[in-house]
Amino acid sequence: MRCGGEPEPSRKRCAECAERDNEHVRQWYRKNWARGKEMQRLGSFRWRLKHTYGITLDEYEAMIVLQQGQCAICQQELPLEIDHDHATGAVRGLLCRPCNLSIGKFEEDPIRLQRAIDYLSRNNSV
């Protein structure tokens, strides 16, 4: 208690101090909203990397550098997603969404993927 006033029952501060503190917090958020949102986004991204994929932000950024910011399959510079083996959880690399979804549609089965490649090779009219 800073002002010497009596706090209301079940409160640690008097109403005047509480309002002053709340206004201070509101002003801070108004000035720092964008930075706060970026910190929140980055924090949740770091958490997801660690708890979903078992990698750090540094490891993720190293993968981007290693792949030159490109999808490991189509080599386009689209937003990249983390591709992982659903059976083991091991991270394989970074893929764009269409390539990542395509692997999923083939249930991550290399034999089915090879058959699709063979089919396209035999029936490609171009």
Image (cartoon, grey):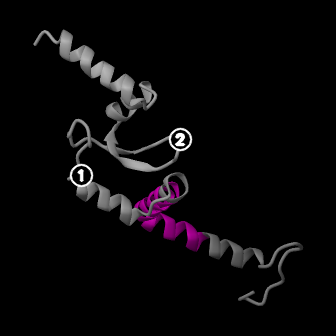
Q: Nearer the viewer, residue 47 or 119?
A: 119
Task: Name the mark on residue 67.
Answer: 1
Question: Of callouts 2 and 1, which one flags the residue occurring earlier in the amino acid sequence?
Answer: 1
Percent of width and height locating residue 26:
55, 66
| Residue at the far front in the pictured view | 111
Secondary structure under badge 2?
Answer: loop
Residue 115, horizontal then vertical, whole percent: 32, 19
Queried whether the magenta region covers residue 36, the answer comes back as yes
Front residue of 86/2: it is 86
Q: Position of residue 85 (x, y in %)?
A: 46, 42
Q: Between 117 and 43, which is closer to the camera in this rendering?
A: 117
Q: Where is 17 relative to 65, above or below? A: below
Q: Which kind of residue does numbered mark 2 sit on?
A: Ala
- Badge 2 crowding class, 10 Å Cα cut-off, few under 14, some 14 to 19, many 20 or more, is few
**Is residue 66 rendered to the left or right of residue 6?**
left
User: What residue sits 64% from the left and 75% below the top?
Assistant: 21
Task: Residue at 28% x, 55% y: name it.
Answer: 64
Instruction: For marks 2 and 1, give the CA distance.
Output: 24 Å
Q: Which residues are magenta?
A: 23-48
Q: How many marks?
A: 2
Q: Is residue 110 left or right of residue 90?
A: left
- On residue 87, the disc is 2
Splitting the image into 4 quarters, where does residue 97 fall? top left
Taking the view exactly as shown, the residue that stands out farthest to the right is 9
- Residue type at numbered disc 1: Gln
Q: Nearer the viewer, mark 2 or mark 1?
A: 2
